[in-house]
Image: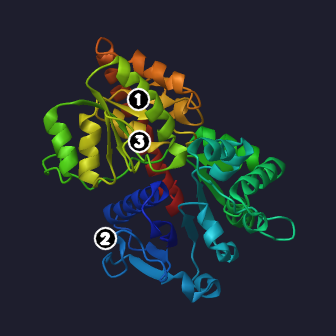
Amino acid sequence: MKVLFDFLTLHSKNGAAEYTRRVLYALLAVVRNREETNISIYCLYDSKSMPAYPELQPNVLTFENVHFIDIQSGVSYINSQGFDVFFLGCAQNGGWHPELTKLNCKTIIVFHDCVWEELYNNDIGIYQTLYCEKIFNYREEKPRGKSIYFDVKGPTLRFCRWLLHSRAKGVLERGSKMLPPSLEMFTNREDNVIVTVSNYSKSSIMYNFGIDCSRISVKYSPERLYVSSEDSSIENPQLLSLLQSKRKYYLIVSANRAMKNAKKALSAFKRYSTFVQDVYVLTIGFGEICFRNHIDLLFLSDSDLCKAYKNCYALIYPSLFEGFGYPPLEAMKYGKPVLSSNVCSMPEILGDAPIYFSPFYESAIFNALLELKDSNYSNYSNKSYKRYCEVHEIQERDLRDLVNMILGFK
């Protein structure tokens, strides 16, 4: 059997890349453990944009069943190799590589979410632009292809033009190009399969693209692989100082991404800190300090991030959109209470463990902060760890099923 495996998604480190990497290691483990000498894995990479993971470079990943094939060699050449199945780890990559639609083998396509469709069909992009005080995106185009951004002079008029266009068109031009190539690939063969990471994402695919539920398989995202050690020393001096001080701190991760809504959570926390003394909030990647009890770190290694999770008082997760949502589970693994947004996949994945709030209301986030107290802390901590164990069991089962699906095992 010849498996064509997506390395195109690995060109940068993000959630989809971590997912694809995890599936790859599980696939390799099955091939090794079963001593399946008749299975060959061909890693489809782009020589113009190499994998971001050093251990997955073509000259580093050496295994007798593993080979590399460059997409620059052309789809005709790739088809000539007679692959049995192609695994695409992130459907949005179809937008970057539309030539994949010409592949003629069976394809398993992973849709993590319909993020652009969800954000803009629900006016979340407009909300982000208004609230974050930045130009979120002006890349729409008029019917004749003339860019709105350059057509109107002056930021105020330009924004008004963008706002009217977004209201009329719904989906931004940029985002609307990402998933259609993968959808076209999906329709090429009746045995092609869509895999998605939550029941919420499944319903989103059905709603946005009209795909029958029978052709969408839900497999929870597998737990991420962190290169970390419990015994390793802390690399970041600011984090080391914070942990040595024994200060109580809440954690907000991926704070540099507008969709994660850190700014609104920080506003709520600033007010909270006027009522509750000696409590801090640590953000990862926000880029500035907003008030006295705010600590911001621009980057943490895998090992340091795990320690930040392990030693925080609780995680605040105010995200506006999630197809699955890794960070809450990563905190819950250490028994940490989670204050979470109540939208999209969060209630499905996290169950009744968190304190939920609406991510659009600062007062709701403030209320969630007030609800978590030392007196009920152990209750929320226990619920977090219990839910993590439940989801982890599903993740392990679904990962085995996905690998078996790729290999054609029953």
Ranked by sequence position, the earlier of labels 3 and 2 is: 2
Identify the amino acid type marked 1.
Lys
Q: Quadrant of residue 281?
A: top left
Q: Are marks 3 and 1 in contact (CB under 8 Å)?
A: no
Question: What residue is pinned by disc 3?
Answer: 327
> Label 2 belongs to which residue?
55
Determine the residue positioned at 59% across, 33% down: 343
Q: Three-letter amino acid code at disc 3?
A: Pro
Q: Earlier in the sequence, mark 3 or mark 1?
A: 1
Q: Which residue is mark 1?
A: 270
How dense is the environment of label 1, judged by Cα within 10 Å: few (below 14), some, or many (20 and up)?
Answer: some
- Residue sitting at 60 percent across and 41 percent down? 131
At horizontal 56% and vertical 64% (from top left) the residue drawn is 88
| On screen, residue 131 above or below 173 | above
Closer-to-camera residue (143/296): 296
Q: Which callout, 2 or 1, points to the residue nearer the camera?
A: 1
Q: Earlier in the sequence, mark 2 or mark 1?
A: 2
Count neighbours of disc 2 (C-alpha within 10 A) and say few if under 14, some if 14 to 19, many if 20 or more.
few
Expressed as whole percent of the image width and height from the top left, the position of residue 167 reads: 80, 47
